[in-house]
Image (cartoon, grey):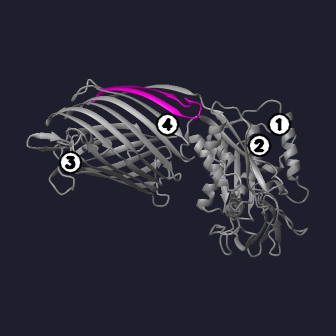
């Protein structure tokens, strides 16, 4: 599917690494795979070596060089007429710049980089729309491409790279045909637009993908031609597509062994045999298999040849992940004490990619407030239940919570059904039962609560741990009733986040709004773990954890409503480092309608992020700004942005 670039010129035309004959009459037609087009370019006129000879000479040079010669670090100088931005792109791609930065002193390696530099630079220039460049690489005054192959070079002191890009080319004619219905070609692929090879490749790729999405799995690029007019600095592009036959999905074959049963592999893959071929169906199957966590790798391959009945068979090969995993975690905080936890996972407990997780946690050891908390839970998740894109989960949990505001022993059981609509959107619903014994300022109480929760999640962030654009929306609604000392009501909570980065400024503006309300019961008839608090790393930084609450008639508890507003300005001043300034504000209300009395507080601070492959390491230092809940500076450390 490569674009082709073939060169023709009059006998008196000179083209090669210099790229242009310099004659106004010269028109060239290109027909080589881009970006490998440079491999076709002929070196120098007047009997100088061809590129084939240069490659052979370089091989001979390596064979007979014997041992590497050492030399001092060389000087690298750039000259020519390239603009500042273009020069930066050339230097970023330069092998010599890399060698200079790495303090390479081996002479043969330096010469090899110099001789390969033409190819590197010319591919950058083509990608930017410069089809008539002149490039020279001088090694101590001699053209690198013409260095005698058998001459032993013992030292390199200075290398000069001279680049004259020439005039930028524009598209004159752009044609890709035939096109599948509703093919969306890139906006820049049009007459008068800069003739960048990346745009040509993008246009061809989109045409190719559109035919595959329309059921033509064996589409090919039948022919392609680029014609450059150096007199007018224009480029004509003609690309011929061969859609091939319309195909339907055939049979699913499984060519690997797995501890997951074949019937479950087929259910997870969910190949729509007999329906029109669509590569998105294959990608959806791959994602479903990966989501289970049972497989280390998933390979989906199309048969080389269609079946006589117009169907195309698909082969699935998987490599199982290790079935069991055990982990231990520990966390120490100056205020909340020591927390230790462990969990054990079986990724294929019954042979159908079911996931069992057993978890235990002890927290609050040595805490300044409250006592020790204990949690023990078990969760079983079964994917591809009812349909391929849904899963069900069963969870039970027993806990003892010794909070500064209440002491509670609780048993919880939950059933959850989750439906994945797309990569960004999913919905969930379920059943929840909680049995609680509570002791707090309201006295000793017992709750037996039954709820029907529903949740939607819409995640359009470009990165879940380090977003710079997009948004995230999550909402939960749960009607509930209580069979003992509680009351019936509706629990509502939401979380909205947005991210915006203007241009290439390196500055990201991030905002978050959280809210919640419990409609129906009073504070005394609501289980205390449902009530709302603010303060801490997940809501208002600079204020102690759950420090904002309400007190009525001498009784302190969480509120029936709350909201928080957070804003951050993130500045990435290095590839791996950024600074953050933030401000958080929180409100907890006595009533569910946000109109009653309540308490507010706020905090602000500065943070540092060290960006890694697994997310940014976050360090935030915050102080209280308003409210009467402050307790001095607060330090937060974690993985991923605060939101």
In this view of the protein, which residue sits in the foreground, 299 or 54? Answer: 299
Q: CA distance from mark 3 to mark 1?
A: 83 Å
Vertical side of 468 occupied by 326: above or below: above
Mark number for residue 112? 2
Residue 35: give x, y in percent of width and height.
Answer: 74, 55
Q: CA distance from mark 4 to mark 3?
A: 33 Å
Dot 4 or dot 2: first in sequence order is: 2
Look at mark 3 in the image and give the residue it sits on: 521
Q: Residues within 10 Å of mark 1 (few under 14, many from 20)?
A: some
Q: Nearer the viewer, mark 4 or mark 2?
A: 4
In this view of the protein, which residue sits in the foreground, 267 or 500? Answer: 267
Vertical side of 256 occupied by 215: above or below: below
Residue 444: give x, y in percent of width and height.
Answer: 16, 32
Label 4 secondary element: strand
Q: Is residue 245 left or right of residue 71?
A: right
Vertical side of 326 occupied by 576: above or below: below
Q: Nearer the viewer, mark 3 or mark 1?
A: 3
The number of numbered discs placed on residues in the rendered structure image is 4
Residue 285: give x, y in percent of width and height.
Answer: 62, 47
Look at mark 4 in the image and give the residue it sits on: 381
Q: Is residue 288 left or right of residue 415?
A: right
Proximity of marks 1 and 2: CB atoms separated by less than 8 Å: yes
Q: CA distance from mark 3 to mark 2?
A: 78 Å
Query: Which quadrant would residue 526 be assigned to in this image?
Result: top left
Dot 3 or dot 1: first in sequence order is: 1
Look at mark 1 in the image and give the residue it sits on: 62
Q: Residues within 10 Å of mark 4 (few under 14, many from 20)?
A: many
In this view of the protein, which residue sits in the foreground, 261 or 157? Answer: 261
| Residue 6 drawn in magenta | no
């Amino acid at each position: 599917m490569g674009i082709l670039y073939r060169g023709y010129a009059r006998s008196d035309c000179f083209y090669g690494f210099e790229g242009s004959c310099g004659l106004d009459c010269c028109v060239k037609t290109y027909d080589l795979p881009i970006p490998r087009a440079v491999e076709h370019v002929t070196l120098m006129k007047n009997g100088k070596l061809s590129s084939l000879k240069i490659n052979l000479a370089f091989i001979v040079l390596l064979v007979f060089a014997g041992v590497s010669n050492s030399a001092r670090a060389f000087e690298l100088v750039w000259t020519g007429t390239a603009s500042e931005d273009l020069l930066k792109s050339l230097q970023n791609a330069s092998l010599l710049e890399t060698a200079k930065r790495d303090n390479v002193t081996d002479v043969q390696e330096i010469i090899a980089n110099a001789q390969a530099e033409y190819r590197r630079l010319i591919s950058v220039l083509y990608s930017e729309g410069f089809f008539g460049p002149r490039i020279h690489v001088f090694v101590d005054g001699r053209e690198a491409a013409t260095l005698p192959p058998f001459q032993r070079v013992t030292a390199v002191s200075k290398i000069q790279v001279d680049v004259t890009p020439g005039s930028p080319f524009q598209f004159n004619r752009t044609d890709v045909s035939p096109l599948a219905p509703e093919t969306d070609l890139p906006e820049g692929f049009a007459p008068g637009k800069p003739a960048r090879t990346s745009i040509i490749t993008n246009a061809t790729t989109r045409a190719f993908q559109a035919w595959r999405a329309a059921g033509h799995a064996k589409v090919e690029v039948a022919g392609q031609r680029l014609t450059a007019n150096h007199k007018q600095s224009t480029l004509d592009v003609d690309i011929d597509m061969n859609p091939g036959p319309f195909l339907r999905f055939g049979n699913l074959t499984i060519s690997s062994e797995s501890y997951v049963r074949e019937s479950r592999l087929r259910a997870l893959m969910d190949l729509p045999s007999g329906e029109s071929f669509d590569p998105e169906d294959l990608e959806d199957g791959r994602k479903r298999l990966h989501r289970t966590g049972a497989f280390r790798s998933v390979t989906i391959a199309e048969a080389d040849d269609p079946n006589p009945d117009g169907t195309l068979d698909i082969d699935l090969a998987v490599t199982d992940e290790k079935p069991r995993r055990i982990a231990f975690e520990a966390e120490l905080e100056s205020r909340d004490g020591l927390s230790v936890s462990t969990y054990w996972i079986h990724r294929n407990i019954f042979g159908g990619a079911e996931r069992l997780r057993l978890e235990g946690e002890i927290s609050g050891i040595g805490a300044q407030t409250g006592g020790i908390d204990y949690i023990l839970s078990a969760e079983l998740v079964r994917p591809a239940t009812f349909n391929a894109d849904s899963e069900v989960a069963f969870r039970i949990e027993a806990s003892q919570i010794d909070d500064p505001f209440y002491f509670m022993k609780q048993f919880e059981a939950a059933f959850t059904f989750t439906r994945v609509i797309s990569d960004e959107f999913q919905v969930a619903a379920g059943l929840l039962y909680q049995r609680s014994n509570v002791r707090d300022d309201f006295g000793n109480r017992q709750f037996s609560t039954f709820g029907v929760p529903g949740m939607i999640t819409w995640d359009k962030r470009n990165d879940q741990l380090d977003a710079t654009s997009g948004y995230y929306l999550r909402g939960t609604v749960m009607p509930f009733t209580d069979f003992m000392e509680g009351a019936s009501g509706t629990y509502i909570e939401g979380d909205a986040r947005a991210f915006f980065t203007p241009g290439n400024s390196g500055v990201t503006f991030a905002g978050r709004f959280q809210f919640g309300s419990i409609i129906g019961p009073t504070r005394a008839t609501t289980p205390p773990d449902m009530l709302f608090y603010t303060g801490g790393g997940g809501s208002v930084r600079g204020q102690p954890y759950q420090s904002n609450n309400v007190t009525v008639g001498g009784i302190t508890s969480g509120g029936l409503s709350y909201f928080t507003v957070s804003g951050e300005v993130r500045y990435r001043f290095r590839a791996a480092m950024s600074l953050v300034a933030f401000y958080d504000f929180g409100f907890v209300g006595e009533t569910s309608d946000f109109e009653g009395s309540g308490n507010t507080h706020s905090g602000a601070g500065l943070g540092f992020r060290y960006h890694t492959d697994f997310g940014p390491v976050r360090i935030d230092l915050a102080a209280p700004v308003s409210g009467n809940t402050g307790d001095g500076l607060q330090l937060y450390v974690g993985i991923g942005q605060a939101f």
